[in-house]
Amino acid sequence: KNQSSSTSGFILLGLSSNPHLQKPLFAIFLSMYLVTLVGNMLIILAIRSDSRLHTPMYFFLSNLSFMDICFTTVIVPKMLANLLSETKGISYVGCLVQMYFFMALANTDSYLLASMAIDRLVAICNPLHYDVAMRPRRCLLMLLGSCTISHLHALFRVLLMSRLSFCASHVIKHFFCDTQPVLKLSCSDTSFSQIVVMTETLAVIVTPFLCILFSYLRIIVTVLRIPSAAGKWKAFSTCGSHLTVVALFYGSVIYVYFRPLSVYSVEDQVATVMYTVVTPMLNPFIYSLRNRDMKRGLRKLR
């Protein structure tokens, strides 16, 4: 049927159209969502309750946990509702709103990861000036800058998507309103939109990623100059959790968004699950299991 998307909305096909898989998928993703909420909330409460964790590194970690809670809440509840629904619909405005907050929060996550890399760079390479370089006002400005850039990027992307026409299929082969699957539905000429999306994605995502790479190259050079093996291990051990999260997050993001639109497939949905659901769920475990300070803070909550 040739009808406007602004009146009919979209249908989110989800991870599987098999009716026998809907309830098992609901149980799995509900469990993962609850673990994400509880785990990240505990991280935030532990950092707030322990004055010894009131440092720049844990300031960024608590905000990362808060963003992860918001990030998954933008996507997962609607996905859970659609798994139990026969219509699986989302309105046109609802789709754009979901797209906006998804991109804003995802990019804030990436900039926070870059801020945490800078924090480790200063702590290891220039420890004598750490208190001055990472003073609270500067950390707050880094957080505000991350949010501002991310929301401006999301606003620009949604305005670009709102100019497209959708006159044929309204079935989005995905579990939420992401740029690539929505672009594939448009009956407008999307060549310009694809170029803008790719260029802007490169600018917004690659910038914090390059910042992380540069920070860790400097850290590696500095650590290799430490004469003792114990000193090298102590310096690297403070970066292990952050590097693990960076690898999980950027590995799946690069796989999904840095390929041509024509090759977008089911594998991309699996990779998207990794950074939208799995990584936010694992973050509290990654940052607390081998971190004595976090374990002490969590014990204080009992």
Image: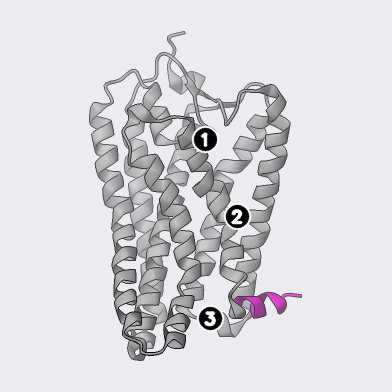
Residue 54's disc is: 3
- Between the residue at mark 2 and the residue at mark 1, the CA separation in whole angstroms equals 18 Å
Residue 171, percent from left and from top = 50, 21
The residue at which mark 1 appears reads as 176
Q: Earlier in the sequence, mark 3 or mark 1?
A: 3
Q: Amino acid at mark 1?
A: Phe
Query: Height in image: 270 above or below 65?
Result: above
Q: Amino acid at mark 2?
A: Met
Residue 121, quarter of picture: bottom left
Q: Secondary structure at mark 1?
A: loop
- Between the residue at mark 3 and the residue at mark 2, the CA separation in whole angstroms equals 23 Å
In-image side of 271 versus 42 (left or right):
left
Residue 294, percent from left and from top = 61, 76
Residue 4, percent from left and from top = 43, 16
Q: Residue furthest right?
A: 302
**Which numbered disc, 2 or 1, marks the residue closer to the eye?**
2
In-image side of 182 versus 58 (left or right):
left
Q: Nearer the viewer, residue 222 or 9?
A: 222
Let me know if residue 104 appears in the view: no
- Between the residue at mark 3 and the residue at mark 1, the CA separation in whole angstroms equals 36 Å
The residue at which mark 2 appears reads as 281
Q: Nearer the viewer, residue 243 or 42?
A: 243
Which residue is drawn at the image coordinates 31% and 33% (left, top)?
A: 260
For mark 1, does the 10 Å Cα neighbourhood hold few (<14), some (14 to 19), or many (20 or more) residues? Answer: many
* C-beta proximity under 8 Å, tags 3 and 2: no
Q: Quadrant of the C terminus?
A: bottom right
For mark 2, does the 10 Å Cα neighbourhood hold few (<14), some (14 to 19), or many (20 or more) residues? Answer: many
**Which numbered disc, 3 or 2, marks the residue closer to the eye?**
2
Magenta-span inclusion, residue 300: yes
Q: Earlier in the sequence, mark 3 or mark 2?
A: 3
Q: Nearer the viewer, residue 148 or 11?
A: 11
